[in-house]
Image: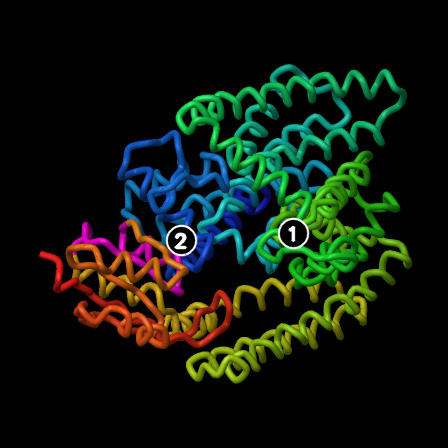
Amino acid sequence: MIDSTKIRFRANPWVKAILICAGFAALYLLIAHSSTLWDRDEARFARATVEMIESGNYLVPTFNGSLRPDKPILIYWLMSIPVRLLGPSEVACRFCQCTGTAITLLLVFYIGRKLFDAKAGLWAEAILATTLLMMLVGSAAIVEGALLPVIVGAMAVFVGRLGLKLRLIDAVAIGILMGFGALAKGPLGLMPLPVMLVILWFGRRDIGDFVRGLLPVALATILAAGIFMAWLIPVDKATNGDFSRLFFGHHVFERATSTLEGHGGRFFMYLLFYPAIIIGFFFPWTIFLPGAISATAGKRIGVDGSRNILLSWMLVPVIVMTLAATKLPHYILFAWPAMAIMAGGVIAGAGRGDLSERDKGWLRGGIWFFMPVGLGIGSGFIAAGYFLKIDEIKLPGLICGLIVLAMTTICGVSQAGGTFARSAKIVIATMIAILAPILFGLLPAVEEIKIGPDIAKAVKEKTNKDMPTAMYKYAEPTLNFYMGRKIDLFKKEYEVTEWLNQPGRRVLIIPRKDLAGIIQKTDHLTFDEIASKEGTNYSNGAKLDAVALVCENLTVK
């Protein structure tokens, strides 16, 4: 007798989607558990969250005791929940990003099913989860993993009414989700807005049709702005306007108009940066992207409206962020779901025989984007240990490199031969398989050369939390997080000597090569070395020998 429950289980695409989501959520949590926090953004977000919990001030974000105007408040609220439950661990600090990524995968399945079919949605879910950029930021204690589900959620509501008028409840839902997006990353949280406007414009039948579609989107925007202002007004009152001045003036306006922290450039950066990022960081699924764009643009896959929605969703974030002077790869992460859905659609379409010869030609041509990146990444893994002169990562780097090179070669041959589904399965299997040498070989080896966590652990064990602590010529936020204390930062020699001359025992963290100069100018001080670590400052790739000392002025009683 046939068990009907098993048939329903196998046939229900939502069950498959949830299982895929749960599997990748577990995988991302494993990634989150496998390394200490990376400087510098992760540690800043994590420490700011801990300071929020310790102070009880859930209105104004701070880092190292000072206002942190880099991002609005939502990320700290979200991170505070697992940190309060689990303590300030790596998994706790990264938990909401991992779960946010999992929610995003389900939303991508829903949109892919709406615009194509369930099979395309399932492929899209797996594709997004295994792109290089998503695996990097989706399990990190930064804002993107928490931002993506709310702005993709807004798109899911919008796409869910495909071919129908947006209702008041839809506008409210979109407004709330974009409001949360603004609370997570300011104007970038409103990125669904220009995408929706472009979709409405190119999907219009006449101007009146565009205006009718514009009204609920305008209502949603007003609601989103209201949600953001409901927090911004009291935080500005508490900081005398400093948050708005620094956030909008520096972190929004200056990033848009000038290159900050070296993240920008001239002609190449303005015109070619984000196309290059897509080729490199949508890897390994760039092998399917040219064919996916061809088939979507030619309306050979998807329902009516799929082309307008997906191409607008992909191109608008790239164009908008190309106009901004400061550039980072994750600034266009919002385009990743659209590309994943198109790639899932072309794989499913190829299996049904829906593609034209032109589409198949572009799919085969995807190897010209895929293979150089694959060969470069594989070779980079192998050469990393030798180039950085780090013996600990040579073996796991070799294993990772050989896996990537094998995948690149096999998939390139398979794609050129027209066996597209086989290429897709090899890609997914490889991206999951490579995590084993990364998690159990490469990351543990890198932990051995990290400086901040070991120095912080020793200082925390051997000194009182209230003991004044400072860093000189070595400033890493992981020290703030793992020590759990405020740390003064000095860049000038006279600043640190004046600080050392004050009464009481003090902790100084300093590169060993700079210690002699300090000692020569402070002959009335005692220096007791309590920790040292020789490793690599991976923020700039330089070798560094750092020491932590307890110092005391003998002339001051």
Relative to residue 469, is residue 443 drawn left or right?
right
- Which region shows up in magenta? 464-485
| Residue 446 appears anywhere in the view | yes
What whole-number distance in Å separates the C-alpha atoms at marks 2 and 1? Answer: 23 Å
Q: Is residue 260 above or below residue 247?
A: below
SS category of the residue bearing label 2:
helix
Say which of marks 2 and 1 sits in front.
Answer: 1
Residue at 82% of width from left, 21% of height from top?
210
Residue at 68% of width from left, 63% of height from top?
280
Give x and y (percent) for residue 516: 31, 76
Label at residue 259: 1
Q: Quadrant of the C terminus?
A: bottom left
The colour scheme applied to this rendered structure is: rainbow
Tell me, yes or no, whether the highlighted magenta stretch contains residue 250: no
Amino acid of disc 1 = Thr
Which one is earlier in the sequence, the residue at label 2 or at label 1?
Answer: 2
Give x and y (percent) for residue 415: 77, 68
Q: Is residue 510 above or below residue 88?
A: below
Q: Quadrant of residue 34?
A: bottom left
- How would you rate the neighbour count of disc 1 (Cα within 10 Å): few for under 14, some for 14-19, many for 20 or more? some
Relative to residue 178, is residue 385 drawn left or right?
left
SS category of the residue bearing label 1:
loop
* Front in this rendered view, residue 95 or 271: 271
Q: Which residue is mark 2?
A: 43
